[in-house]
Image (tube, grey):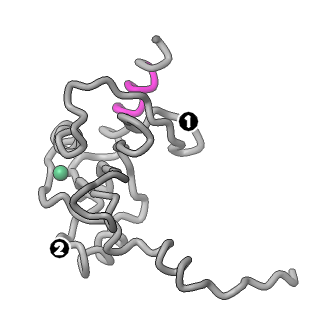
Amino acid sequence: MATQEKPRTTYQETYNTEGPREIWCGLDHSSIEEAIAHAELNLGMRGREAKAYWGTMRFTDYVVGWQLNDRKRYRLDYAHAFSEENEKAAKWAGTKRLKGSQGVHVNEENFDDPKDKGVSKVCHPTEASLQRADTYWSKWTRQYRQR
Ligand SMILES: [Zn+2]
């Protein structure tokens, strides 16, 4: 193959780097329920009607989270390389478990955050297992399909 990769620009470098763009919510949530409640509180989503947020997990489309609109949403996520990612994040995030003790975490995205224009993503780590996260994706997807 003769294709040569172009050197990355500073912009791409910054854009693709998981760094201070993502911050820790400040708590270690024992359960997924707790992490979702915290994200919903931050986003002002509690008790409000939300639309399904679709994503792909292991090559299958699932409802992975919920969105108030396309600027405020959260998703339940799993980091395969969580120990490596946690180790990297420890240097800047203020926690050694940013992605959860078993890789399960909730990502909160708020593109209208008035507090900080530079940060749009908040990570809520949990102690839950992938199996537990799986029951959520399946349940949410079933719920949505029944409507
Ligand atoms: Zn949290």
> In the figure, is residue 111 to the left or right of 24?
right
> Which quadrant is home to the N terminus?
bottom right
Determine the residue located farthest toward the right in the rendered image. 2
Label whose residue precedes the other's in the sequence (2 or 1): 1
Determine the residue located farthest toward the top in the rendered image. 147
Q: Give the secondary structure at mark 2.
A: loop
Q: Quadrant of residue 85?
A: bottom left
In the image, residue 58 above or below residue 118: above
Label 1 amino acid?
Asp
Q: Nearer the viewer, residue 16 or 59?
A: 16
In the image, residue 42 above or below residue 33: below
Q: Is residue 138 magenta?
A: yes
Where residue 44 appears, as percent x and y from the top left, is 21, 38
Q: Is residue 116 magenta?
A: no
Residue positioned 49% across, 72% down in the render = 15
Q: Residues within 10 Å of mark 1 (few under 14, many from 20)?
A: few
Proximity of marks 2 and 1: CB atoms separated by less than 8 Å: no
> Which residue corresponds to mark 2?
94
C-alpha gap between disc 2 and disc 1: 33 Å
Q: Nearer the viewer, residue 45 or 131?
A: 45
In the image, residue 81 above or below residue 56: below
Label 2 amino acid?
Gly
> Which residue corresponds to mark 1?
61
Where residue 57 appears, as percent x and y from the top left, is 51, 44
Q: State the extent of the magenta-drawn residues as a range.
A: 135-142
Q: Give the secondary structure at mark 1.
A: strand
Q: Nearer the viewer, residue 137 or 24?
A: 24
Determine the residue located farthest toward the bottom in the rendered image. 7
Residue positioned 45% across, 32% down in the render = 63
Magenta stretch, overall SS: helix
Q: Is residue 107 among the parts visible in the rendering?
A: no
Q: Residues within 10 Å of mark 2 (few under 14, many from 20)?
A: few
